[in-house]
Amino acid sequence: MKRREFVGTLGAAALHRLPAASDTASARIARIGVQLYTVRDLMQADFEGTLARVAAVGYREVEFAGYFGRTPGQVRDVLRRNRLLAPATHIGIEPLRGDWARALDDAHVMGHQYLVVASTPDEDRRTADDWRRVGELFNRAGEQASRAGITLAYHNHDYEFDRLGDLLPFDVLLEATDPRYVKIEMDLFWIRKGGQDPVGYFRRWPGRFPMVHVKDMTIDGRMVDVGAGAVDWRGIFAYRRLAGIQHYFVEHDEPGDAIASITASYRYLRALRI
């Protein structure tokens, strides 16, 4: 996927200052997870060894982005050996149009609570009506998932904030989907890359964001380890209850040293009081 250039309207003040918080109690993040896309090359070379290294950093939750040729049962066994939980995994949109029942069965084997559609193909997002049709698909699949005890969610990038006339695709999708059946995993880097404020969405759509991708950004729009950028994490996470956040997944799309990156991000978040 081609990444957009940084939106120039995001200045230092926008990154550093957010409205006054609604959640005032000071606490630490209870669940710090990691999206395994960050360590994908290591996973490809040494699946079980990499998960052991992730656990050694201190993570107890992981989010998958593929099982690297292993069955859900095999992956589950590796997780158990390393005392890891996998509340979520990323999937493509294709299973929603195909053997959705099998995807739900696999989720049960893995212990997933959430199946997260990672992105929307180009052909499904050219017009506002395309996004409404995606919303209808999500509603149907999400209702089936709910009956099976699984929650369907969608993960944003920045293209959901490229205007279609007067409309933002992200708004169209949120309006088209039933909050009972479709949740959002907000990527806190890409929403800012798209020129939007996550807190504004938390206020407009309370309770719809049980998961977030925690990815830091510099003033000039580069992705960096959490704590090395300019994002006001306390300001965002002060709204955690309003948003409904339950899981915080660290991610870096192109880390120089993947283990060093997830270690630095974990240590920052572990010490952060919100």
Image (tube, rainbow, N blue to C red):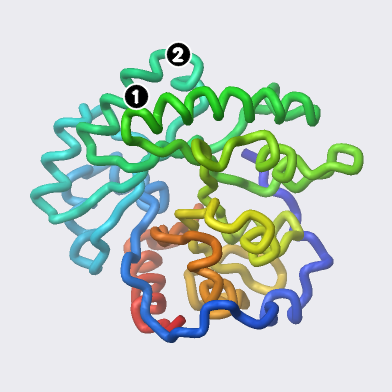
**Mark 2 is on which residue type?**
Gly
Residue 119 locus on image (x, y percent): 57, 36
The picture places residue 226, in percent across and down from the top left corner, at 48, 71
Q: Work out which quarter of the rendered image holds the N terminus and state it.
A: top right
In the rendered view, does 199 fall on the left or right side of 151? right
Q: Is residue 51 above or below residue 72?
A: below
Q: Nearer the viewer, residue 227 or 96?
A: 96
Where is residue 174? Give x, y as percent.
66, 42
What whole-number distance in Å separates the C-alpha atoms at marks 2 and 1? 9 Å
For the question of whether residue 237 can be seen, the reply is yes
The residue under the point 55% across, 28% down is 139
Q: Amino acid at mark 1?
A: Ala
Outermost residue to the top: 98
Q: In the drawing, what numbered circle is on residue 199?
A: none
Q: Which mark is residue 98?
A: 2
Seen from the viewer's position, the closer of residues 242 and 44 is 242
